Image: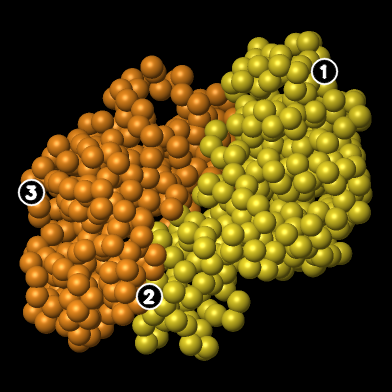
Chain colours: A yellow, B orange
Amino acid sequence: MRISELTTPALLVERDLLDANLATMSAALPGPRLRPHVKAHKTTALARRQQASGHSGFTCATVRECEVMAAAGLGADLLLANEVLDARRLGSLVADGARVTTAVDSPETVAAAAGGGVREVLVDVNVGLNRCGCPPERAGELAAAARSAGLEVRGVMGYEGHLQLVSDPEERKRRTGEAMALLQAAAADVGGEVVSAGGTGTYRDNIWATEIQAGSYALMDTAYDAVGHPFGQALSVLGTVVSVSAGHAVADVGLKALGMDHGLPSIDGAQVRRCADEHTTFVRDEPVRVGERVRVLPAHVDPTVALHERMHLVDGDTVLETWPVDMRGW
Amino acid sequence: MRISELTTPALLVERDLLDANLATMSAALPGPRLRPHVKAHKTTALARRQQASGHSGFTCATVRECEVMAAAGLGADLLLANEVLDARRLGSLVADGARVTTAVDSPETVAAAAGGGVREVLVDVNVGLNRCGCPPERAGELAAAARSAGLEVRGVMGYEGHLQLVSDPEERKRRTGEAMALLQAAAADVGGEVVSAGGTGTYRDNIWATEIQAGSYALMDTAYDAVGHPFGQALSVLGTVVSVSAGHAVADVGLKALGMDHGLPSIDGAQVRRCADEHTTFVRDEPVRVGERVRVLPAHVDPTVALHERMHLVDGDTVLETWPVDMRGW
């Protein structure tokens, strides 16, 4: 199939860029040094490619992601890097032979993990993001509570998400070190082997974690442009120009095809003016014709992917494979 | 089933508010005066409720919406209020007995409609939104081209989307009148019976259109709060508090469960600080406990709905019905 035959809007993944991104990351963080985060693509076919690059442990953000990964045979070592109050579906996966570790940051989440049939946990520590995670000084006590509840505590996790888009490399590295000092102190109190942290923005800076939870590196988005990185923008949304006026043109890619929390998407060689439910309005010096195909680059990949049923792996004008985005929903 | 048994995040629709919204709108715009826009809910079960309120014609934004409406037996008079370059799927619906009218604003979209097997069109006119739509003075010529191509031209449409959130009622009414003067001039050139326009923000102001394409009124969102209206916020996203810290709490409702283009969601009695992929961080004076359920109100309903597989019609703590959001995708 050719790209020109696709119904738009359609998610395109450039095969060469994807493979280069995977290879670059796997060279920097081989095997278990990387625990790819599937929330960035929600696609088991892509996770399988990451597995083929040497990574058998994965990070998930939702129970559904764990379920679909396990069902796809990718459940050898899943980390739900998130708190959950009803862990029974995770317990079912464990009972069926998957290895699922979940994050805990409170007595309630410890009780939920133990009650739901999960056997292994990481203590989630707030390293400065100020979202989930217990205070570093409470990590040891929480680990003891987890062990009392019969859980195996594999170690700690702590996501320095507030540092992913710090553009100055020296500042990013220094602050990552400060955040990881908090996590290492907690790890000493908690015990276990695992110190899980990091992301695409800090994958080179975070030399303290035993494993890095990067996800965006595979497909990339324009929000990371401010941070120097060696990854190519592999994901775009293919659109069709449906209307052309004197001062602007409109493509059929809108709010329901684009994650908008990081702002407007971009189109190479054009200025994007605004988006509506099914439309992106843009201006281009070069003439635009009705029916022309355009590539719209989302500012944030993760919520963009969650809006699409499938993504197409492409090379030039050829559609090589079509992958269901099979980890959507909860 | 009780709300407390639902997996979160989950879309909730308050039955009483929904029914009141539908009744209020149907009283103001009875029968064919309203052509409900399904893009705001993407749910045939809800469209069926709108049909039961007296409206048999519907507005769609995508080909998929037309297909699913027709398959659900709601295809008596569908308007695709959008331009399309490949109309063959619409033509198939027409061949199968649905009535589908599509918008055209260029020779290319006229050719696509005729070539795809669509029989009826509206000429889409730019009334100041500056998105799709031909200049008013070109509408007559386009209608002639459509008729030459064998198409039935039912009239015109022109969406005053730029006026939906104008908060001053006098200004909104005056400017709606100016926009509709452009549309009426085009209608005189085009001929036909239909003058289709309007939305929830201007449904009372637009006394010139023969039918109003309102959609948001059914579920409503907080973006319309600036505009005085009689509709209740029927839609919310139910979340579970998964983490509580000294200064904030976190619910499991994030960017993948919320349309973010109109900004942050809100939580009654709390201040929302930020959202991440699967999290909303908020602050509340009243204590928050882990496991507590919260209702998150999205700033923009339409893209929020597109992120969910289903919505639950609720009354108090009871889940009355669960409806698939069956018009997602393209």
> Which residue occupies the foreground of this view, B71 or B302?
B71
- Do callouts 2 and 1 point to residues on the same chain? yes
Whole-Å distance between the Cαs marked 1 and 3?
63 Å
Quarter of the rendering occupied by the N terminus of chain B? top left
**Horizontal arrangement in the rendering, residue B210 relative to residue B73 (left or right):** left
Q: Residue A124, located in which quarter of the rendered image?
A: top right
> Which residue occupies the foreground of this view, B270 or A209?
A209
Q: State the residue position of label 2.
A: A243
How many numbered discs, if any? 3
> Which residue occupies the foreground of this view, B70 or A248?
B70
**Horizontal arrangement in the rendering, residue A71 relative to residue B14 (left or right):** right
From the image, state whether disc 3 or disc 2 is nearer to you: 2
Whole-Å distance between the Cαs marked 2 and 1?
59 Å
**Measuring 86% from the left and 36% from the top, which residue is drawn there?**
A195
Q: Is residue B291 visible?
A: yes
**Horizontal arrangement in the rendering, residue B162 relative to residue A114 (left or right):** left
Q: State the residue position of label 3.
A: B30
